[in-house]
Image (cartoon, rainbow, N blue to C red):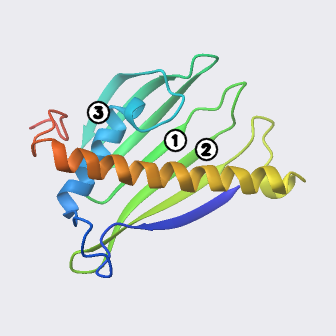
Amino acid sequence: MKFEHLVQINDPKLPVVDWLTREQLWMGLVARAWKPTRFILGLEQAEVTEISHSGTVTTLHRRLDYGAFQVEDTIELHDELRTETRVVPNQHCGPSTLTITIEEPEQGLLWLRFQYHVQDADGLNAEDNAHSEYEEARKQAYRAADIDTVKMIRELASTLPADRGMPLRKDH
């Protein structure tokens, strides 16, 4: 299944909603990478098992515990641009990727683009199987989770100091 959608962050038509800066939005995505239990429903524990740096990219290897099963993934943090998460396939899930990109078509008008590419554990793409209702439900769940991610980022931006104590690069 390939699926993508946009979530508007700053909307000039909604002046009562606090606007986020690009830095605040980025720090929220960094928080999601380091502390995914705050963002992902059903995730009981998360452990960063390895960290590497290459230029402006930080890569985290993580072990995610959902109780009934565990998942390993890597997430690349491309400084103030995007995150790319790759799930290692196992008996419960196939290979998948999630890319979250910050887009700014005009100064201050921020959007997040969520791009999913998911294969089932049996190796089939959603287009290959006849479970279209299941896939539509999955897309709706992704949309809802991504909107919740933005809500959590807004909450963090309003309550936490600028330094959230999560290293972005080796020199931080």
In this picture, is 95 found above or below 141? above
Mark 1 touching mark 2, by CB under 8 A?
Answer: yes
Residue 55 showing in the rendered view: no
Mark 1 = which residue?
A: 86
Mark 1: few/some/many CA within 10 Å (<14, 14-19, 20+): some
Cα separation, mark 1 vs mark 2, equals: 6 Å
Mark 2: few/some/many CA within 10 Å (<14, 14-19, 20+): some
Q: Mark 2: which secondary structure?
A: strand
Q: Where does the N terminus fall, quadrant-wise?
A: bottom right
Image depth: mark 2 or mark 3 in front: 2
Instruction: Say what amino acid the circle numbered 1 marks.
Output: Arg
Q: Nearer the viewer, residue 5 or 117?
A: 5
Residue situated furthest front in the rendering: 16
Mark 3 = which residue?
A: 52
Q: Earlier in the sequence, mark 2 or mark 3?
A: 3
> What residue is rendered at 78% in x and 41% in y?
123
Q: Nearer the viewer, residue 63 or 13?
A: 13
Q: Where does the C terminus fall, quadrant-wise?
A: top left
Residue 163 showing in the rendered view: yes
Q: Mark 1: which secondary structure?
A: strand
Mark 2 = which residue?
A: 96
Cα separation, mark 3 vs mark 1, equals: 15 Å
In this picture, is 57 found above or below 82? above
Q: Earlier in the sequence, mark 1 or mark 2?
A: 1
Q: Position of residue 164 (x, y in %)?
A: 15, 37
In this picture, is 37 found above or below 95? above
Q: Position of residue 104 (x, y in %)?
A: 30, 74
